[in-house]
Image (tube, rainbow, N blue to C red):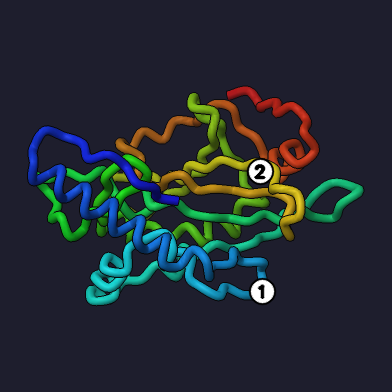
Amino acid sequence: MSMLAAPCGNDPSWSKDVLRATLASAAAIISLLCDWVPSDGNAKPVSYWRVELPQTFLARLTGRGRNLAHLEPVIIACPAKAPQNQFTINVRYSKHCFTVAFDPRRHKPKWMIMDGKQARAFDEERFELSKLLAAMIAALPQADVNQTHERNYVYTIPTSRPDGRRYQMFFRIGRAKSGTPYDLELFVESAYLCPTADNKRLPYKIRFSVLAYKVSTGRPVRFQPR
């Protein structure tokens, strides 16, 4: 969750904007944290994003006919080897799926939100593309993914864009904490278009269901050759 961060930059007005956005994010968490219960797959008493984002930011999205309902946490099932028939995976999305790094030359302060110490700004392109993520998550159990040099994973799909650029979803996966009603936790760290249309095959490929099995059982992950 977003926490208080020190203002950054040398421009006093920029520092004030960052501080205001940080305080707004913190206020949203403080006002709702005591009432919020994470999804158990059956109910969501309070929207995840009502906790993660300032209410003023959400109101602006609503005013533009936008909402983040498609990025609420969800629990999916993934086929598994014996003794289990399947794993359950709790999926959450980061703010990076619909924001970019805040640039005071391009973005209005009212669209700034904080992600830890990072100032971010709502981005229309990322937001529209994020509507593809639910289908990508649903397809993961039958999909191949690739490990990146940063030791997280990426799943890419083609798009209908004339330039041929693919949409890529970066995520981490790990065991769930004891006592939670699911086996694994998957966090989508970011999702955006590939910088170029270079669709060369990525290295370190592995079937997602195999990855989930190995992570759940603590077994080493070995990759298919490029």
The residue shown at (38%, 52%) is 95
The residue shown at (66%, 43%) is 208
Q: Amino acid at mark 2?
A: Phe
| Disc 1/disc 2 C-alpha distance (Å) | 25 Å
Question: Would residue 131 be visible to someone looking at this image?
Answer: no
From this view, report whether residue 11 is shown above or below residue 85: above
Frontmost residue, 219 versus 168: 219
Instruction: Answer left or right for 74 relative to 95.
Output: right
From this view, report whether residue 182 is shown above or below residue 201: below
Residue furthest to the right in view is: 83
**Numbered badge on residue 208:** 2
Query: Which circle's residue, 1 or 2, is located before the other in the chain?
Result: 1
Instruction: Answer left or right for 80 relative to 172.
Output: right
Which residue lies under the disc numbered 1?
Answer: 42
Frontmost residue, 127 versus 41: 41
The residue shown at (16%, 50%) is 17
From this view, report whether residue 4 is shown above or below residue 51: above
Q: Amino acid at mark 1?
A: Asn
In which quarter of the view is residue 102 placed? top left
Give percent across and percent down for residue 56. 26, 68
The residue shown at (40%, 50%) is 2
Question: Would residue 184 be visible to someone looking at this image?
Answer: yes
Is the residue marked by circle 2 packed among few (<14), some (14-19), or many (20+) residues within 10 Å?
many
Give percent across and percent down for residue 58. 31, 69
Q: Give the structural element (helix, strand or loop) at label 1.
A: loop
Give percent across and percent down for residue 215. 72, 38
Q: Which quadrant holds the C terminus?
A: top right
